[in-house]
Amino acid sequence: MKTLRVSLINAGRPSFTSPAVSPPLGLLYLAAYARKHVQADFQVIDQRGLDLPLEDVIRQIRDFSPDIIGIRCLTANAGMARKLTEALRTELSGIMVVAGGPHASSMGGKLLEDMPIDVAVPGEGEVPFTSILQAVHSGSDLSHIPGIW
Ligand code: B12
């Protein structure tokens, strides 16, 4: 069976009002859990930690050529995450984009109105994100997965 390619992005950049950075543990948890259940290769891009310009992030994603993209978003970085998702739609169209992290937990399904993503996952993401990957792997839809929008 095909190995899924999954890009995970810690979106945004530190700023004067939101300066703290830390390793994107949540994304690493997602990858560690999912790879026990799905045949997948992961790319993790820490845009916020490395203060990467949008163009660098897009280039790295394009080079990896993923089947699915997962984005961690803080509310403080929502504007930059929106720009990232808009750039993904125009420059890498046709790839499923899933958003999670604290901003998705705060916004729930309203996040789908705010940025061009396919799925929003509130709360802890290990189980629902793995279910999404399994569905994409097997070509089924996501309607059976609870707790996602
Ligand atoms: C410890 C902590 C910190 C620590 C370390 C943060 C860290 N580990 O990254 C420090 C002190 C550095 C910190 C800094 C900041 N923090 Co803080 N922090 C917390 C706290 C208490 C726990 C965070 C944590 O480590 N969780 C464990 C990790 C593993 O969870 P996680 O990253 O959220 O990932 C899980 C889910 O979110 C989800 N998920 C995450 N990404 C994705 C992506 C996809 C695709 C999917 C499907 C799911 C998914 O699945 C993951 C695994 O279950 C939370 C409150 C809370 N109880 O959650 C606040 C919290 C996350 N922090 C918050 C804020 C505002 C900040 C700062 C922006 C503060 C500032 N002004 O600079 C910075 C941002 C730094 C950063 N890189 O995140 C807010 C975020 C609010 C929001 N709506 O965005 C929270 C929720 C507190 C609050 N209630 O206001 N923080």
Image (cartoon, rainbow, N blue to C red):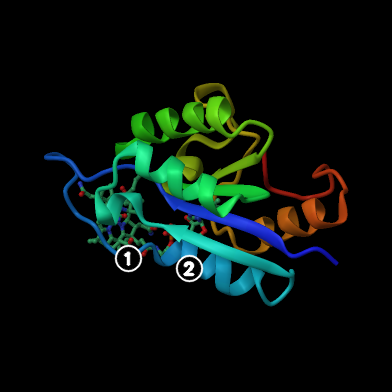
**Left or right of residue 81, residue 95 in this image:** right
Which numbered marker is on residue 23? 1
Disc 1 residue lies near ligand 1 with CB under 8 A = yes
Ligand 1 falls in quadrant: bottom left
Q: In which quarter of the image is the N terminus?
A: bottom right
Coordinates of residue 139 in the picture (x, y in percent): 87, 49
* SS label for mark 1: loop
Q: State the residue in front, 147 or 6.
A: 6
Coordinates of residue 27 in the picture (x, y in percent): 48, 61
Q: State the residue in front, 74 or 89.
A: 89
Residue 114's place in the image compared with 39, above or below, is: above
Q: Do the numbered discs 2 and 1 sit on residues whose CB atoms are within 8 Å?
A: yes
Count every numbered label the image shows and give the total: 2
Coordinates of residue 92 in the picture (x, y in percent): 58, 34
What residue would you read off at disc 2? 28
Mark 2, residues whose alpha carbon is within 10 Å: few (<14), some, or many (≥20)?
Answer: some
Type of residue at label 1? Pro
Residue 62's place in the image compared with 93, above or below, is: below
Q: Quadrant of the C terminus?
A: top right
Examine the image and state in which quarter residue 91 appears.
top right
The residue furthest front is 63
Examine the image and state in which quarter residue 38 appears.
bottom right
Residue occupying the point 27% across, 56% down: 49
Residue occupying the point 68% across, 48% down: 147
* SS label for mark 2: helix
Residue 119's place in the image compared with 27, above or below, is: above
Q: Earlier in the sequence, mark 2 or mark 1?
A: 1
**Left or right of residue 112, residue 16 in this image:** left
